[in-house]
């Protein structure tokens, strides 16, 4: 298989860049294993770039969209519980469906991430990633007001835990009911990271919250916030420094002449 074949497989999902990139990522991992096992000699997927490099992927929820969802799904509903768990823990949907009373001790969640538990690195399993997160008061209030499952907080209408895909589909329906057809569960994770960065969270703090091992992902959020702050602080420098007119007022123009 050559890079052109990988591009063809990627471009079949060009309409959904995130899905296209997921194919490239999976093939990179497959060929990385194959080369490590001496089944393949090269990794053609490494030469194929992601499609979403110029996009931001899943839509990041705004504060107004969060409020719209809350108005459509008040405290005590399963939809509101799901949104609070996603927003106030920052976990992926594969982990939010597993959160439950047995993971909560002394005001903290203790759990092992689902993603990457069996990923191999240099021929070795890296091991599970254990996480500890405090239960925020805002989330505690929603938990106390919501009907909860026995083993997991979120359960289906049959009182069974959701699968990750089943939860994603159900959350999609809740978003549609609120008129937020462009919003998704993953977008709430991005919204939380954005809010934290805007409130001053550092890259390493974001890494601790979201379980990122590299500051590269966190930097996407801190850079955006820093650009906004720096622009706000520097915009006045665009105003030309011209001598005041005879009446003591600056002309406000580059030529120093009063506008007509």
Image: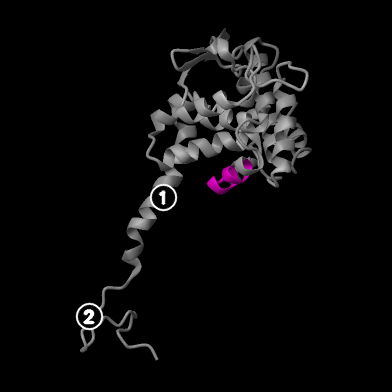
Q: Nearer the viewer, residue 221 or 3?
A: 221
Q: Can residue 147 be seen in this view?
A: yes
| Quarter assignment of residue 160 | top right
176 vs 100, left or right, is right
Question: What secondary structure prevails in the magenta region?
Answer: helix
Report the residue at 54% width, 39% height from top. 191
Q: Nearer the viewer, residue 34 or 63?
A: 63
- Name the spot of residue 40 as percent of width and height, x first: 69, 16
C-beta proximity under 8 Å, tags 1 and 2: no
Q: Is residue 126 above or below residue 154?
A: above
Asked which secondary structure carries label 2, the reply is loop
Q: Does the magenta stretch include residue 103?
A: no
Alpha-carbon span between mark 1 and mark 2: 31 Å
The number of numbered discs placed on residues in the rendered structure image is 2
Q: Residue 227 carries which label?
A: 1
Q: Give the range drawn in magenta.
A: 60-69
Q: In this view, does 150 lie above or below 64?
A: above
| Residue that carries the numbered disc 2 in the rendered image | 243
Q: Does the magenta stretch include residue 64?
A: yes
168 vs 192, left or right, is right
Mark closest to the chain's N terminus, 1 or 2: 1
218 vs 159, left or right, is left
Report the residue at 39% width, 46% height from top. 226
| Quadrant of the image containing the C terminus | bottom left
- Name the spot of residue 60 as percent of width and height, x first: 58, 42
Report the residue at 43% width, 39% height from top. 197
């Amino acid at each position: 298989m050559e890079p052109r074949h990988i591009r063809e497989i990627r471009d079949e999902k060009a309409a959904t860049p995130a899905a296209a990139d997921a194919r490239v990522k999976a093939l990179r991992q497959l060929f990385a294993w194959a080369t490590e096992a001496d089944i393949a000699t090269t990794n053609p997927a490494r030469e194929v770039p992601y499609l979403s490099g110029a996009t931001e992927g899943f839509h990041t929820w705004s504060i107004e969209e969060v409020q719209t969802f809350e108005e459509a799904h008040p405290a005590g509903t399963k939809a509101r519980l799901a949104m609070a768990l996603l927003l106030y823990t920052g976990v992926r949907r594969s982990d939010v469906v597993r959160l439950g009373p047995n993971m909560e001790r002394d005001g903290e969640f203790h759990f092992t991430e689902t993603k990457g538990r069996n990923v191999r690195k240099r021929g070795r399993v890296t091991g599970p990633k254990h996480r500890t997160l405090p239960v925020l008061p805002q989330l505690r209030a929603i938990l106390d007001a919501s009907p909860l499952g026995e083993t997991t907080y979120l359960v289906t209408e049959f009182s069974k835990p959701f699968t990750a895909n089943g939860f994603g589909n159900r959350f999609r329906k809740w978003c549609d009911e609120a008129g937020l057809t462009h919003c998704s569960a993953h977008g709430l994770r991005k919204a939380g990271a954005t809010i934290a960065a805007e409130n001053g969270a550092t890259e390493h703090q974001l890494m601790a919250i979201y379980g990122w091992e590299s500051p590269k992902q966190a930097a996407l959020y801190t850079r955006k916030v820093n650009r906004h702050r720096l622009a706000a602080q520097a915009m006045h420098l665009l105003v030309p420094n011209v001598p005041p007119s005879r009446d003591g007022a600056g002309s406000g123009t580059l030529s120093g002449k009063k506008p007509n």
